[in-house]
Image (cartoon, grey):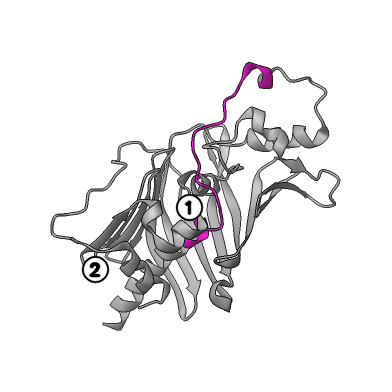
């Protein structure tokens, strides 16, 4: 059935896009940045740039869980689909995207990112892959990291080589506070990677992030992430609307895809299981075969 195939392709391509998007971050993250007493006791006479970066960093949530129903949209090639779904995230454990069939709300696919592996489940064809990041061909070449992706989904700054950005890391970022307008660019350069966040001057919320990578194996790629519809989560705010566009010229041909997530509500429910165990009735397939199919939309 054509509708069935379209839903399946949209689900699979969304998974591929999220994975490929992470390829823009060329570092395998290990460990965290220690928040030392020396860093906490810095002189009050900090630069205006560092002071602004500190205020941006202070906007991150303290909650462990973020969950909510969502509208999932994707535009890529001939695909232009909007489907219902769910987003479930548990800090430092999992990021889960689930896509449903409209009206009947039956799950057709899910992807789970954990610090150690990626799990992709295709419920229509009763197949799944479970692989370490190093096993996924094109992802291995680009470098993929759970903590970078987590920072983007959680609307935070990220620093290659760390699990999270600590107080002592903030002087590595530069806030262009003299920039005109309501947004202040915050930048970071790390090897072949360039990062740029735009934070609102008034409340220091990150409104967009841009990651660009220039590599020899896969050419130039960029990941543009936008945030909106901020909703209160405790004393902080979280963007209920997120969209990200991945652009690459790998293979000499420019390709672009955009995914949009619009959450109906933002909750902090904790009564859900973080990790999925595929049914014994599902067939485990090779990662490289699945991702070749995903990237070629077969």
> How many residues crowd around disc 1 within 10 Å: few (fewer than 14), some, or many (20 or more)?
many
Note whether residue 118 is visible. Answer: yes
- Residue found at x 49% / y 57%: 262
The quadrant in which the C terminus is found is bottom left
- Residue found at x 53% / y 67%: 258
Q: Mark 2 highlights which residue? A: 124
Q: SS of the residue at dot 2?
A: loop
| Magenta span | 20-39
Q: Main secondary structure of the magenta part?
A: loop
Q: Report which quarter residue 172 is drawn in.
A: top right
- Residue found at x 37% / y 67%: 291
Q: Would you place residue 91 above or below residue 135 in this image?
A: above
Q: Report which quarter residue 157 is drawn in.
A: top right
Residue 25 within the magenta-colored segment of the rendering: yes
> How many residues crowd around disc 2 within 10 Å: few (fewer than 14), some, or many (20 or more)?
few
Between 50 and 232, the residue placed more toward the observer is 50
Mark pair 1, 2: CA separation: 27 Å
Determine whether, in the image, residue 43 is placed left or right of residue 100. Answer: right
């Amino acid at each position: 059935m054509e509708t069935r195939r379209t839903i399946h392709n949209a689900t699979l391509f969304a998974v591929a896009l999220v994975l490929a998007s992470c390829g823009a971050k060329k570092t395998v993250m290990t460990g965290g940045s220690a928040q030392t007493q020396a860093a906490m006791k810095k002189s009050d006479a900090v630069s205006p740039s560092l002071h602004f970066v500190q205020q941006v960093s202070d906007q991150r949530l303290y909650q462990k869980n973020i969950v909510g129903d969502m509208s999932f949209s994707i535009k890529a090639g001939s695909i232009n689909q909007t489907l219902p779904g769910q987003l479930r995230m548990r800090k430092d454990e999992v990021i889960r995207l689930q896509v449903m069939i409209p009206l009947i709300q039956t799950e057709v696919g899910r992807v789970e990112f954990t610090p150690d592996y990626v799990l992709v489940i295709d419920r229509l064809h009763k197949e799944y892959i479970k692989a370490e990041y190093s096993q996924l061909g094109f992802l291995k070449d680009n470098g993929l990291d759970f903590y970078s992706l987590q920072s983007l989904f959680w609307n935070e700054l990220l620093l290659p080589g760390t699990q999270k950005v600590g107080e002592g890391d903030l002087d590595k970022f530069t806030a262009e506070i003299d920039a005109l307008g309501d947004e202040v660019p915050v930048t970071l350069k790390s090897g072949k990677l360039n990062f740029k966040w735009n934070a609102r001057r008034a409340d220091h919320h990150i409104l967009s992030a841009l990651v660009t990578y220039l590599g020899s194996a896969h050419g130039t790629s960029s990941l543009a992430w936008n945030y909106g519809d901020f909703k209160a989560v405790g004393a902080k705010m979280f963007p209920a609307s997120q969209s990200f566009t991945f652009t690459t010229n790998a293979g000499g041909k420019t390709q672009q895809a955009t995914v949009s997530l619009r959450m109906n509500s933002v909750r902090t429910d904790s009564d859900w299981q973080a990790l999925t165990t595929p049914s014994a009735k599902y067939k485990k397939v090779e990662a490289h075969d699945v991702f070749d199919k995903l990237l070629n939309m077969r």
